[in-house]
Amino acid sequence: MNNQMQVTYLKEWQHLEECAECMLPLIGKLYREHNVVTTVYGRTLVNSTTIDILKSHRFARLILDDELSVLDTFPIVEAMTRLDLAPARVDIGKLTVRYKAEGSGIGVDDFARRELASVNTGRSPILSEPRDVVLYGFGRIGRLLARILVEKAGSGEKLRIRAAVVRKGGADDLAKRASLLRRDSVHGHFNGIITFDEQENAIIANGNMIRIIYADAPENVDYTQYGIKNAILIDNTGKWRDRDGLGRHLKAKGIDKVILTAPGKGDIPNIVAGINNELITPDEHIFSAASCTTNAIVPVLKAVNDRFGIVSGHVETCHSYTNDQNLIDNYHKASRRGRSAPLNMVITETGAAKAVAKALPELTGKLTGNAIRVPTPNVSLAILNLELGQEASVAEINGYLRQISLDSALQNQIDYTNSSEVVSSDFVGSRHAGVVDSLATISQGKRCVLYVWYDNEFGYSCQVVRMVQKMAGVELPSVPN
């Protein structure tokens, strides 16, 4: 009997694996030829492996408390390839659940044609011409932005990463920067092939040529000589945070918009993608993508405030150390940050609580905040200690946030886990702004404590790219609604 069960389990796995393998070329074709991004409850299947596809289905099963199998979703994907789809994000998980709920009253082709009618309008380019993107700085965030932009290049009709501006480090500068993009101690190897062209002084990442431009001042670069025009520049150096400093980029030929990957000062709009996108207007040319912590907590705070109300609260972050700190004790202009980052927990300040008010004015003056830098290289944890406007149980709070993570306008920002074994390293590579740890939620009367994990590097970079997509007009419609 035991031997028979071993055979049964293996054959079941092989059958699922074979089905997922058959899905791969169909998902790739939809993406390359139609700019259709296939997802399972918000998790993209584009550029996935067979195992990635099976794990995405497994995730949906855990969240939905119901089986979601590739055997069920595969016919939906096949039916999609028989349509002439315009660019869109299509959630085959949601479509499959909806199709199964209807029973056998309609064929899968007719169902797909009906549900995808709004995007079954023929292939079409998203933009009349690709929008150029320039990275000013090529450090931790810059290289992750490059990875994401290359991954999302698709058929080349959307965003097009053209250059990275840096200070030259030495004779082998190009080779070293290519190597840093290829290998990362936290995020692993680049998903693809990287070479470099010394004559063009460019890194070639999956066919995308990223020219490395050397400059000491923003206004000294003429991007048009490289064929770059109307570009969105992402300043990830943090050197300038006010309008005057960041405005220097706009003096350079070829630059149209500037995004700062840090909190902006003065009247610069601080954008948290998915929350206050309405501040991205054509007549504004300088924006801030706020901080990683602000991006992590604002979506959850908005969701909670919309449903339960927030009277007051305190935000405490356990934040991984950054390049701003010292490896060993040495001078630092800020208090405590001079002490060795890998050896100490370091109490420091965070402006995230005050920054919340820029994205959610209704919470102005209601939150305080502080931070502890901890000896981990990536992934942070925000602890939201809140007084609500009404009593709410753990089940009510978690049930609501789970639903928000699955099917809402904040699906890309808020993720949800119900595992009792997760730790910080499990969230490396998370594409969400924050992940609610449901089993850590505490509630007593009107008081609640929420724990939100976030990849302060990659998750934040994904938020920045979402902001760029909004600015460039390449946001894809999501179906089903």
Image: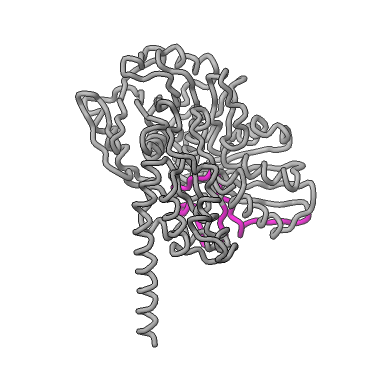
From the viewer's perspective, is residue 135 above or below residue 28?
A: above
Look at 57% across and 38% down and name the residue there: 295
Q: The N terminus lies in which quarter of the figure? A: bottom left
Left or right of 63: which side holds 181?
Answer: left
From the viewer's perspective, is residue 215 above or below residue 289?
A: above
Question: Which of 261/354 is in front?
Answer: 261
Q: Is residue 133 visible?
A: no
Q: Is residue 378 magenta?
A: no
Left or right of 469: which side holds 384?
Answer: right
Residue 121 percent across, percent down from the top left: 49, 40
- Residue range corresponding to the magenta coloring: 416-445
Look at 36% across and 48% down and name the residue there: 28
Look at 55% across and 60% down and name the residue there: 99
Residue 425 percent across, percent down from the top left: 45, 52
Residue 172 percent across, percent down from the top left: 22, 28
Question: Which of 283/216 is in front?
Answer: 283
Residue 351 percent across, percent down from the top left: 60, 32
Instruction: Specify how the rendered protein is coloured.
Output: one colour
From the viewer's perspective, is residue 12 above or below residue 271?
A: below
Q: Quadrant of residue 210?
A: top left
Q: Is residue 57 visible?
A: yes
Of all residues, the one furthest to the bottom in this rendering is 1
Left or right of 213: which side holds 447?
Answer: right
